[in-house]
Amino acid sequence: MATIPKSDTQTRPMSAEERKVIIASSAGTVFEWYDFYLYGSLATVIGAKFFGQYDETTRNIFALLAFAAGFLVRPFGALFFGRLGDLVGRKYTFLITILIMGASTFIVGLLPTSDQIGVAAPIILIVLRLLQGLALGGEYGGAATYVAEHAPHGRRGFYTSWIQTTATAGLFMSLLVILFTQSSMSAADFRGDAGSTLWFGGWRIPFLLSAVLLGISVWIRLQLAESPAFQRMKEDGTRSKAPLTEAFGKWSNAKWALLALLGMVAGQAVVWYGGQFYALFFLINTLKVDSYTGNLLVAWSLLLGTGGFILFGWLSDKVGRKPIILGGCLIAAITYFPTFHLLAGLANPALTKAHETVTVTVVTDPANCSFQFNPTGTSKFTNDCDILKATLARQSVQYSVQPASPGTVASVKIGDKTIQGFDAKAAGAEAAAKTAALTKQIGDALTAAGYPAASNPSVAKMSNPVDVFRGQTGGIVLVLTFLVLLVTMVYGPIAAALVELFPTRIRYTSMSLPYHIGNGWFGGLLPATVFAMNAQSGSPYFGLWYPVAIAAGTVVIGAIFLPETKDRDIFSEGLENK
């Protein structure tokens, strides 16, 4: 694409029409992310309601599988709706996506449970999750393209940065609604337990509220006109007749989608999920902070750090997209290990001390141990080594592995106590009871050796949201805010960078696929990958090598192969100057 000279559009104030475009696009996308995140935040409750015919372990597996399905289908939504957006227009395509997402979420709030309609309940739930994932796959590319094509030259980073706030704002909104609903009723009423006052379950309220958000989003978007770039292309008769073929069937175009994925989006995705989702997972599951307080701490960090999206989007108009995005990836790669160690020291000092002082060793035949990568939750790891390692990893234990001769039944040494493992397949019907007994045995031995109890009393449950700024929890919020600021660095300018990389005729299609492969797969699989790496290595921190390596690789590939795009004319149709 050719570059064009700077103009007074860089300094003039935002027009009323441009402001309406940003508000409409951003508001709708916030609501869509809100809908998508509700399921993840309430996966445990949903598992009990819709997969209640199974035991607790199995229903949690199915609940996670349904959540993962929404991530895995996002690239297919990007292809379908991206093609539609390049053929018929930006406005109507992302109006369709908001309708699908909002309706699917509202129906989850009305859906009868498995106790009421049997196996139909989980089937319908998974179909709704797939529809949510497909809709989200088409939403982002449409919103980003629409705003960028309305933005004046020299201000695209600033204008599109408002879209970049929407994922964090949607997560924040979902956490806020869930926290408010939980705090206004008993736990039994929230779950909708038998005999509770609120018989239908307070967990449905956040889903039902999406109807209000949907109505607002649709009304706002109906007021918008088509993007000027698409309208001009339509009038000139230069629309692509086969966007998918043109975007990915020609290497001259497809290579830019591949480079965008590996040299920009993959690193952005792991920093984004590492700084928000995994930080929350680490707080609650590894450091044993109670769920309410963990969500509150993360919500505060999101509130404090979200302005960084606008700051770095604006700054990218001045210094370029690459320095900001790749700089954020580089800082994350350098600081992730010390940052998460610091977070552990603040949030659970007793656990940190136990890691340093208590020796735990798994004695096993290494050939009998699996790499426990389980992104969909459907794989079962049943041999003695895997059961021991998974149990220790879930209890946030740091351990080493001592090789044993082939055929040796795995065992774990905790201080001077040795606990024998077992093979779940061989145990048959007794496997569940044996697993529970083994977990208790290991827990008791860990506590006796110096590990803290399963709960984390060092971070008391917050009764007042403002209490988070007092003492220990104030430090935790600062560390979490630093992680959020890294998220804003890599994510704030990326919409503008992706829009500028591709020509108008195939822009929606071309930018959507690398974005959703990067965020849906590289980012969405981060928790499962990190857990598997932790269980394999015996360290609660080893899995951080996954986001660190991906972020570092993105810095190298992006720095060498991707051009700077901030001064390009996005109305140009050529790729020859790339």
Image (spheres, rainbow, N blue to C red):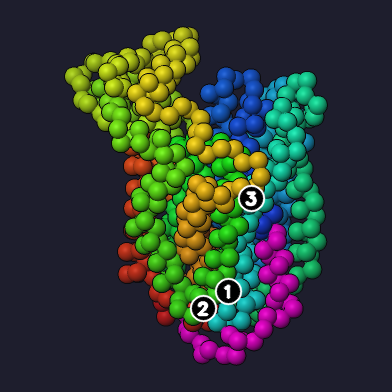
Give left or right: position of 373 versus 499. left
Q: Residue at x 47, y 58 (%)?
A: 482
Q: Is residue 18 magenta?
A: yes
Which kind of residue does numbered mark 2 sit on?
Asp
Q: Which residue is mark 1?
A: 158
Mark 1: secondary structure: helix
The residue indicated by pointer 2 is 317
* Marks 2 & 1, CB-CB < 8 Å contact: yes
Residue closer to the observer: 295 or 32: 295
**Of callouts 2 and 3, which one flags the residue occurring earlier in the amino acid sequence?**
2
The quadrant where residue 63 appears: top right
Q: Nearer the viewer, residue 344 or 552?
A: 344
Look at mark 3 in the image and give the residue it sits on. Answer: 466
User: As displayed, is residue 310 above or below residue 536?
Assistant: below
Residues 24 and 448: in front is: 448
Residue 221: x percent and y percent? 75, 64
Q: Is residue 175 above or below residue 531?
A: below
Tag 2 near tag 3, CB within 8 Å: no
Q: Which residues are magenta?
A: 1-28
User: Is residue 539 left or right of 328 when viewed as pictured?
Assistant: left
> Disc 2 vs disc 3: which is toward the camera?
3
Q: Residues within 10 Å of mark 2 (few under 14, many from 20)?
A: many
**For mark 1, does the 10 Å Cα neighbourhood hold few (<14), some (14 to 19), or many (20 or more) residues?**
many
Q: Residue at x 38, y 11 (%)?
A: 426
